[in-house]
Amino acid sequence: MSLHTAPTILIVDDEAQNRRLLAVLLRPEGYLTYTAASGEEALAAIRDCPPDLILLDIMMPGIDGYQVASIVKANPATANIPIIMVTAHTERGARLAGLDAGAEEFLTKPVDRTELWLRVRNLLRLKSYGDLQDYSFILEQQVRARTADLQRFRTAMDATADAIMLVSRDSMRYVEVNATSCKMLGYTREEMLQQGPAALGGWTLDELKSVYDAIIAGQAHPELCEAALTRKDGTPLQVEVHRQAMRSAGDWIIVSVVRDISERKEAEQKLQHQAHHDPLTGLPNRTLFYQTLAHTLEHAGPRGWKVAVMFIDVDHFKNVNDTLGHAIGDELLAQFSQRLTACLRARDVVGRLGGDEFALILMVRDDHEVVGHIADKICGALRAPFHLQGYEVTVTASVGITVYPDDAADPDLLIKYADTAMYQAKHAGRDTFRFFTAQMNTDVLRRLELESALRKAIDNGEFVLHYQPKQHIASGQGAGVEALLRWERPGHGLVPPSAFIPTLEETGMIVRVGQWVIEQACRQIQAWLDGPVGPMRIAVNVAGRQFVEGDLEADVLRALGQYAVPPGLLELELTETSLMLNTERTIACLRNLRDRGVRIAIDDFGTGYSSLAYLRRFPIDKLKIDIAFIRELTNNPDDAAIVRAIISMAHSLNLLVVAEGVETAAQLSYLRRHDCDEAQGYFYSRPLPPEAITGFLQESRHAGRPADADAPERTLLIIDDDPFMRELLLTLFEHEGYRLLSAPSAEQAFDTLAHHDVHVILCDQQMPRMEGVAFFDRVKTMYPDTFRIVLSGKFELEPMMAAVNRGAIDRFYTKPWNDALLRECVREGFQRCRAVSAL
């Protein structure tokens, strides 16, 4: 070992992880390390650059640790290198073999950091200094003779990184110190020799005498102890001291080896801080927060104080992470915590419990109104936009509050109740706060009861599948069925899915239930294949947690194989949100299944991410338009435009389109006219149990498409709430060769437009619930190629001209009208419609 460099240690282990771990553990002590991955590599490294110490694994391929140790010790040039064998073996035979090979020490895996430091340090000292008894002899010779040997000893002492101080027991003064001692404490050697260890602090003179006497008497084993010394400039110094007593003529010399551990102490304090504080926000973490809460309650009880606990959750924080990235999400949490802290008093405590969850401890001596004001202040402060790397983000928070001792006296219960109240704040619309009530606890207990009942339902086989048919719109033939989960709960009857599926998903039980659904669907497909129904595709809903926590691919392939089902008869329906969970894993799973023939559909399209990027990335066969857009399809221009856009986009991507929730013939006609591929809903059938759906499928197998009400003839739609006026207008045009349709209201007119291909529309302006111009504003968006005429009993030139200018109507006439002019206007309308069609 060089006199001016740190000791070098060779780490020999065939496992890279073990080598890195040992190097990391040794780094804080200032050692230089290099590594070898085999016995051969180690011997070459020792030959090229002998280390000061070797950490040697026993079990290695090729030359093992025993052989390496034997070779090293057999070579006079390397025989004095200390060897510590590191092994997972605890047998006595392994240790004896190692000692026989020449190892000085053993360490057992997993390695204890402190034990590693001590064994390495002690062996290096023995190597550097020689045997301690030789030192005692040298010291005695130096003290007695004060010869040149003293200078050589001092030179060796000065070369060490540790401070070495020799103290006379009789005088309690230093008789020798090395250069490191002077540098460490800021004194000259002469100043050190004029004083004793008591002057440096750490111990009183009497305490030192007692310690020295115990060492001399053999009553105290040489052990490490820590102390705080004082430098010459008054600054404190954390040290580690190892003492040894040696006889010198009629006196005893206490040899103290002192190591500066200031950096280690700082590192320990940093680790301690990291163990109890959140690294992102610097706030107390869950552990420290719970400890602080327990301590606060201990003091509050005897003094009659109240303590409020707030549980705060950032609303929709996941959206920030998913859209802007985790780095911006972290910055948002950091700024969020700063605003929280700014809202509090000096005696209050805020901590981050994890994720986007924070908690507060408030000392309260007044009523609950004070806590409510603070909660309202917090919510208000958080509403201001956050500026995050060029983005302006606005978030809110939901706050739950519980009070000691009114609600509970236990810290865990207080946190639990505050959490419960926070969820009630979320259910109330977010961006608000709620105090805990007993009813909330009742709701939680009810939720726990539901969870327990669901677990029993899985074990007892209480779930069943009902099936809702899907039809090809163009042909009217069956396109398959969707499997829908139902729960036959004892004593409750058939439980609707909305009452239990969210709980299955939140608790993760959906993974087991999802496996069962896939298996039952494949079993039903097999039964239909073997019966009169024949091949019939079944669509199964898949939750996002089945990708993250389960093995969906294995579940599907196992069920297909078990029942010998062609993969093309199984379809998986996923929501847009579930696709975004663990995206890469989801893509790989779906691609593998699709390559085998399984069909993939996106359920409730338009209500989630609706991203063209994922339509391109994911292996998708179908889009299912959510019922929210179908419900008012025939009378809401926005919904109609969305449906047309989804159909057009899907077809351009070679995807089929399924409309969910079709309930009327008008909706079906509109979808047929705009080339939607399949439809599903109560118009065809409610979800049916297996026996009923089997009969339905048999009856509908040979059914064809109903006659199309559309015809290529010129069609005129007359709308008036007055029956006499409708009849008068129908009589006016009955000999013109038009197909005449009529409706008494705008609502019925929308259904008629959905059913029929209408060219010209003649509508009264003064109608209840919706005037003619308002009706035509919607028609213009939904059926832009129609020719639109308004009849009004009032002369309203200004609003009519405005409607003409914005394209809502093409003509308007007042009542009573001129028959010839009205007939000519309608003929003109049909001519224009033909011209548009020709284009």
Image: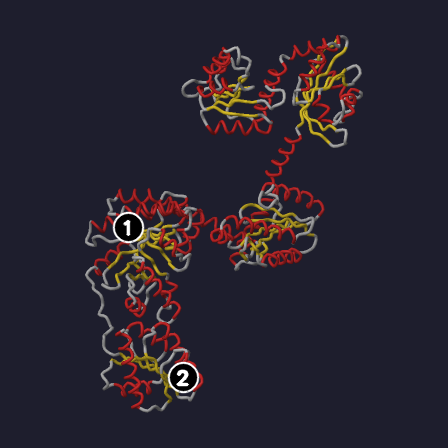
Residue 608 screen position, x and y as percent: 42, 57
Q: Is residue 663 left or right of residue 799?
A: left
Q: Is residue 833 above or below residue 159?
A: below
Q: Residue at x 44, y 18 (%)?
A: 64
Image x and y of residue 475, in percent: 22, 63
In this orientation, does residue 808 appear?
yes
The residues bearing labels 2 and 1 have C-alpha atoms spaced at a distance of 54 Å
Task: State the residue position of label 2.
Answer: 766
- Most foreground residue, 79 or 731: 79
Kind of residue sitting beneath label 1: Leu
User: Around disc 1, counting alpha carbons within 10 Å, would you say few (fewer than 14), some (14 to 19), or many (20 or more)?
Assistant: many
Q: Is residue 288 left or right of residue 684?
A: right
Q: Secondary structure at mark 1?
A: strand
Mark on residue 570?
1
603 up-or-down from 61: above or below: below
- Going by the numbered disc 2, the residue's amino acid type is Gln
Quadrant location, the N terminus: top right
Residue 651 is left or right of residue 394, and the answer is left
Under tag 2, what secondary structure? loop
User: Residue 817: percent from the left, percent from the top?
Assistant: 34, 90
350 above or below 220? below
